[in-house]
Image: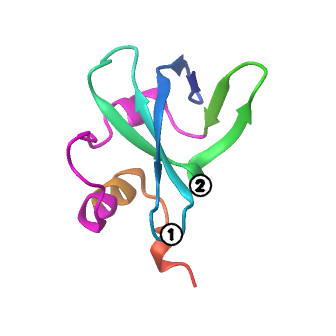
Amino acid sequence: TIAARDDPFGAVDDLIIDDHDWHVRYFVVSSSVLPSKKVLLSLDWIKEIVHSGKKVHVDLLKKQVENAPEYKLDEPVNRGYEEVLYDYYGKPKYWDKV
């Protein structure tokens, strides 16, 4: 379960691994409101993972995640998509880190 600041919702469906450095880059998340829509959450945005409770806590609001740019399973995650995603959340871009 994804636990946003204001409400738990949805679930982690899959992981996306960077095939250059083999880091787990994103969780693929589906919402309980819109189960067919998938969105991505960077592991950098995860506040806590509680294994016993099977919850992933994020410091985001439920609506923010639900309204995030949709991830289409049949399209690759490229830098253009990542730019839109990081800009939407207002988060620093991992590729800009020195």
Residue 64 percent across, percent down from the top left: 40, 36
- Which mark, by number, is residue 11? none
Over which residues does the magenta segment extend? 59-83
Query: Residue lying furthest right in this view?
Result: 52
Q: Does residue 11 sit above or below 67 in this rendering?
A: above
In magenta segment, residue 35: no
Q: How is the image coloured?
A: rainbow
- Horizontal side, residue 73 vs residue 7: left or right: left
In magenta segment, residue 62: yes
Task: Identify the mark nearer the N-term, 2 or 1.
Answer: 2
Residue 24 percent across, percent down from the top left: 55, 53
The amino acid at mark 2 is Asp
Q: Does residue 30 sit above or below 19 in this rendering?
A: above
Q: Residue at x 62, y 44 (%)?
A: 46
- Which mark, by number, is residue 94? 1
- Which residue position holds label 2? 44
- Which residue is nearer to you in this view: 23 or 62? 23
